[in-house]
């Protein structure tokens, strides 16, 4: 549920601010015209794709597999295009200069940051609006349904996205504006930004679940057999949370998530459509999947990964500056009307490096974590079956989130069959092709095939768990080693 595009947009707008700020635009009117043109172009593409998908679905009675693939690929390309236009608005077309200098908002608290990010938020809203008509056609939702109304859809999307990002924005403002105003010399220290990023990550870890609970339309899962079953599973697994919530999506989303590292601020959310679609045992398997993310400590490791990468990026920004200047000089782009070229090249290099690292490393990590959670979901539902008393699972013995009772859980063919059915149903209800690739989760088909192999040969699971552990330890060592080298470079003045 991490809003990756919005996080990348924040990085583009503010994380690269110090070494990629463009020269002022020739005129405020020119900067405004380019910005509006980019936003309108994105909106036109989104409405075009959404309208074409809806037209094809009405023409054939239901969207074909090809139409679904085109829509899925188009959605991804639009996301990339949205970030590309946002980068151009910030680092090429002079929008920040227009806001800070021409409009006179430099030095204000929150307002300047909100105005700098405003074109991205407007463009994202328009892209969502255009894509909505295609999503509605793929899901087969009539326009008379509450979830088939564009205004309601956009309202829920904005609430969902802002609830996840608002804590980050508030903490960023506190760090960038309040601390900068009260202790101006602090941010001049070489260690200030990495320390601030670490504090920012811890703050997000603590307060973001509260924002989600307040901002997302949810209500507690009513008392009854389903809640009793899920609470019994949580008790047996040693899993603690503040509440189990029904996530009101107007039946538009079949999904579940867990948020919060601390039990006092931890919530498990099951969407209304998920509860309506799946059987009680399939819901138990999905709930077990979310418990698995906590049991394997995925949430804090993700945060460590992101904060560590951001800290490393800020510490080595001098390398991007030097490389950008060298490339600009080599291409003869550092003088005259192209004086801003070095900054643009720096931004492109930094974004390319971050994008490649996140796409490859984070994608590999996330897919492994999803399979760990899938295995846990299978074990949970195996334990729910009559006579379920599987053999011990050594991977869970040392986890304080999981008690001794759950250390006897293991995977079995029946549990795999039920969990696989839940995955297939979620994919079908969301209009997702089971074979469609996902860089964060892997395809539904590949996840089901992996679980089926484990059901036939359960002895292969410990080897998989050890491979994931080695990958985590190797990534941790690589990140810590890189941070140490960067720290040494700053200490000896090699990265100034």
Image (cartoon, rainbow, N blue to C red):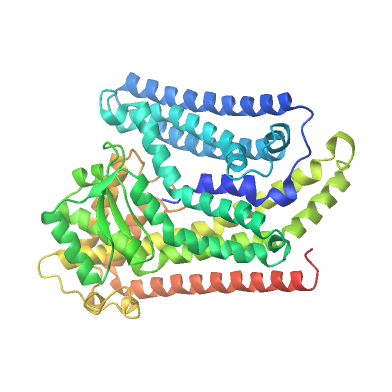
Q: Position of residue 148 (x, y in %)?
A: 31, 28
In the picture shown, does residue 263 fall above or below 128?
Answer: below
The quadrant of the picture occupied by the C terminus is bottom right
Give the residue drawn at x 20%, y 48%.
278
Residue 253 image-quadrant placement: top left
Give the residue drawn at x 79%, y 50%.
324
**Which is nearer the eye, 430 or 117?**
117
Q: Position of residue 274 (x, y in %)?
A: 25, 46
| Left/right of residue 365 with respect to residue 150 in the rendered view | right
Q: Position of residue 269 (x, y in %)?
A: 29, 52
| Extreme-front residue of the structure | 182
Report the number of discs. Answer: 0
In the picture shown, does residue 493 fall above or below 418?
Answer: below
Give the residue drawn at x 89%, y 40%.
335
Residue 360 seen in render: yes
Q: Where is residue 312 in the image (x, y as percent from the top left)?
A: 65, 63
| Left/right of residue 376 with respect to residue 405 in the rendered view | right
Residue 439 seen in render: no
| Left/right of residue 247 with respect to residue 180 in the rendered view | left
**Which is nearer the eye, 388 or 202?**
202
In the picture shown, does residue 307 fall above or below 106?
Answer: below
**Which is nearer the eye, 164 or 175?**
175
In the picture shown, does residue 259 fall above or below 78?
Answer: below
């Amino acid at each position: 549920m991490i809003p990756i595009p919005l996080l990348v947009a924040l990085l583009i707008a503010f994380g690269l601010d110090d070494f990629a700020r463009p020269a002022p635009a020739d005129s405020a009117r020119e900067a405004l015209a380019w910005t509006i043109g980019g936003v309108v172009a994105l909106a036109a593409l989104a409405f075009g794709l959404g309208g074409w998908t809806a037209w094809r679905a009405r023409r054939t009675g239901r969207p074909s597999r090809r139409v679904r693939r085109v829509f899925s690929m188009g959605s991804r390309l639009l996301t990339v295009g949205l970030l590309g236009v946002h980068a151009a608005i910030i680092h090429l077309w002079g929008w920040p200069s227009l806001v800070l200098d021409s409009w006179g908002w430099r030095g204000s608290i929150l307002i300047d940051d909100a105005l700098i990010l405003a074109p991205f938020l407007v463009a994202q809203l328009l892209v969502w609006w255009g894509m909505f008509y295609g999503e509605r056609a793929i899901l087969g939702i009539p326009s008379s349904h509450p979830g088939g109304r564009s205004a309601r859809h956009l309202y829920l999307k904005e609430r969902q996205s802002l609830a996840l990002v608002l804590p980050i924005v508030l903490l960023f403002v506190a760090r960038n504006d309040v601390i900068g105003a009260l202790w101006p010399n602090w941010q001049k220290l070489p260690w200030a930004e990495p320390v601030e990023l670490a504090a920012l990550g811890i703050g997000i870890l603590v307060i973001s679940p509260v924002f989600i609970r307040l901002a997302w339309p949810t209500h507690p899962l009513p008392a009854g057999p389903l809640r009793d079953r899920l609470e019994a599973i949580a008790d047996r697994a040693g899993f603690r949370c503040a509440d189990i919530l029904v996530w009101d999506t107007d039946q538009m989303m079949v999904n579940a998530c867990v948020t919060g590292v601390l039990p006092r601020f931890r919530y498990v959310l099951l969407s209304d459509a998920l509860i309506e679609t799946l059987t009680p045992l399939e819901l138990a398997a999905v709930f077990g999947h979310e418990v698995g993310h906590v049991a394997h400590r995925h949430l804090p490791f993700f945060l460590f990964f992101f904060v560590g990468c951001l800290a490393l990026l800020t510490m080595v920004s001098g390398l991007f500056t030097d490389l950008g200047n060298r490339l600009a000089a080599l291409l003869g782009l550092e003088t005259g009307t192209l004086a801003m070229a070095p900054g643009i090249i720096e931004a492109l290099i930094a974004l390319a490096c971050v994008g490649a690292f996140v796409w490859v490393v984070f994608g590999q990590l996330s897919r492994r974590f999803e399979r760990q959670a899938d295995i846990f979901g299978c074990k949970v539902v195996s334990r729910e079956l009559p006579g379920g008393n599987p053999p011990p699972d050594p991977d869970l013995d040392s986890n304080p989130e999981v008690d001794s009772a759950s250390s006897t859980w293991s995977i079995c063919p029946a549990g795999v069959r039920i969990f696989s059915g839940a995955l297939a149903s979620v994919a079908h209800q969301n209009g997702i092709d089971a074979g469609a690739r996902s860089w964060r989760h892997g395809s539904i088909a590949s996840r089901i095939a992996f679980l089926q192999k484990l059901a036939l040969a359960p002895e292969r699971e410990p080897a998989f768990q050890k491979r994931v552990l080695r990958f985590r330890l190797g990534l941790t060592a690589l990140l810590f080693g890189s941070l140490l080298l960067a720290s040494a470079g700053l200490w000896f003045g090699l990265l100034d």
